[in-house]
């Protein structure tokens, strides 16, 4: 397999893992609309659903396969023939089909979920990959709960499924348990100890239970993984998944990592809004990259520094993620520089004395009103003119 060693593939599971959030179920037409936007964003793989789980999910995979041309369309299965048969059938119209099959890899899952043994699970993993490979060339294998799995056993499993035909091996931190250095070390161990690892791409799929999903994904990439799995806005079960927009912008901001994606980052803001409204999942205002306050500056010291030079307080340009523009929000903590900026924007050039007077009255107003808008400022200046 020939791959650019610096390219990171983006695997979006907004329509599968993201849709598992209670109350966020989408209709097939809504899924198609989001899938087309994901294609425009430039994602490499769209996980369209879990076909065996419901007729609706099956149909969504069929229709998304017809609707998109460039991305790989992926269907999730468990490691059994019935699931794989349903996935194969649902992918019949996909230009680039992929089956994502797998099984638990931690002793916790082997014992308490499957009531099985390591040897038996290994056999089932290999069997599932071989069976899926008969129908579809591109097979991704997930070693569920790899975050808590014994690393030597995990390496044995990865080696066996690659030998059976897996083209991508997914090492999920299913419970969001790992610390970044632990997760990075796990990926590094696989890279160095699995003899056929060069025949597959290592993928990272991290959950955010401890708020570490993005950090863990980056640690995985730094140690040799070349596919990142995540969702728009970081939606997903429990505390959510890795936010695709965060990982992509980290790689773009930290050029020293030497990694890149084929994502058109200017589409992030609009797509974030679409996913939020269709899934009825508000984006927290202080969410990195796409939150409504991500480029809003309200403290006086920050505003002054920002107005002198944007880079004092911004490492990402709002337009790079399709954000309308950075905003200087006027609050009781805003300084004179911010007030002057807004008054000039409205066409008022005040002298130093006039500005001092206006600022004094502005603070009184800001103490009583949370958001100061243009109308308030016009009233403020008009009062002074009358006075």
Image: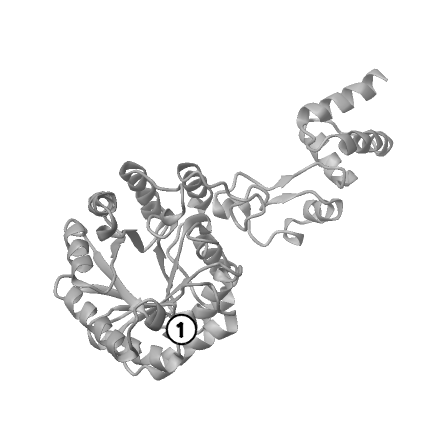
* Coloration mode: one colour
Q: Quadrant of residue 336?
A: top right
Taking the spot 35% from the left edge, 84% from the top edge, the residue there is 193
Residue 145 higher or lower than 369, as above or below: below
Residue 10, percent across and down? 36, 58
Residue 215 higher or lower than 56, as above or below: below
Q: Secondary structure at mark 1?
A: loop
Q: Residue furthest left?
A: 134
Image quadrant containing the N terminus: bottom left
Q: Residue furthest top?
A: 386
Q: Is residue 96 left or right of residue 366?
A: left
Residue 8, percent across and down? 38, 63
Image quadrant containing the C terminus: top right
Q: How many marks?
A: 1
Taking the spot 30% from the left edge, 68% from the top edge, the residue there is 114
Residue nearest the viewer, comparing 327 with 367: 367
Q: Is residue 259 left or right of residue 26?
A: right
Residue nearest the viewer, comparing 260 with 134: 134
Q: Is residue 252 left or right of residue 113?
A: right
Residue nearest the viewer, comparing 73 with 153: 153
**Disc 1 target residue:** 224
Residue 324 appears in the picture as rendered: yes
Residue 68 higher or lower than 200, as above or below: above
Residue 142 appears in the picture as rendered: no
Residue 261, percent across and down? 39, 59
Residue 220, percent across and down? 44, 69
* Label 1 neighbour load within 10 Å: few <14, some 14-19, many 20+: many
Residue 299 higher or lower than 202, as above or below: above
Q: Quadrant of residue 339?
A: top right
């Amino acid at each position: 397999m020939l791959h650019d060693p610096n390219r990171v593939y983006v695997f979006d599971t907004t329509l599968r893992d993201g849709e598992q959030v209670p109350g966020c179920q989408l209709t097939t037409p809504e899924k198609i609309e989001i899938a087309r936007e994901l294609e425009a964003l430039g994602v490499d793989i769209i996980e369209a659903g879990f076909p065996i789980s419901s007729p609706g999910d099956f149909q969504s995979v069929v229709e998304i396969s017809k609707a998109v041309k460039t991305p790989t369309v992926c269907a999730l299965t468990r490691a059994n023939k019935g699931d794989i048969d349903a996935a194969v059938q649902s992918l019949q119209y996909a230009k680039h089909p992929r089956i994502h099959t797998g099984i638990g890899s931690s002793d916790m899952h082997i014992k308490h979920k499957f009531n099985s043994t390591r040897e038996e699970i290994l056999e089932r993993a290999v069997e599932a990959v071989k069976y899926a490979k008969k129908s579809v060339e591109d097979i991704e294998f997930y070693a569920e709960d790899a975050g808590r799995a014994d690393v030597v056993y995990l390496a044995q499993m990865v080696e066996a499924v690659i030998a059976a035909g897996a083209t991508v091996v997914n090492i999920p931190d299913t419970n969001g348990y790992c610390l970044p250095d632990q997760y990075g070390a796990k990926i590094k161990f696989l890279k160095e100890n699995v003899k056929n690892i060069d025949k597959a791409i290592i993928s990272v799929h991290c959950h955010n239970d401890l708020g570490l999903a993005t950090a863990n994904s980056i640690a995985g990439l730094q140690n040799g993984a070349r596919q990142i799995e995540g969702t728009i806005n970081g939606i997903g079960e429990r505390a959510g998944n890795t936010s695709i927009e965060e990982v992509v912008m980290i790689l773009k901001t930290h050029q020293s990592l030497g990694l890149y994606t084929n994502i058109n980052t200017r589409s992030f803001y609009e797509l974030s809004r679409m996913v939020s409204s269709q899934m009825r999942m508000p984006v927290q205002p202080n969410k990195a990259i796409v939150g409504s306050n991500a480029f809003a500056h309200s403290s006086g010291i920050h505003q002054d520094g920002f107005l002198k030079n944007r880079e004092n307080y911004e490492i990402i340009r709002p337009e790079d993620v399709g954000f309308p523009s950075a905003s200087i929000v006027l609050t009781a903590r805003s300084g004179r520089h911010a007030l002057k900026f807004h008054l000039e924007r409205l066409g008022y050039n005040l002298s130093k004395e006039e500005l001092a007077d206006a600022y004094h009255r502005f603070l009184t107003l800001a103490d009583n009103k949370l958001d100061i808008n243009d109308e308030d400022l016009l009233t403020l200046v008009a009062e002074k003119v009358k006075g």
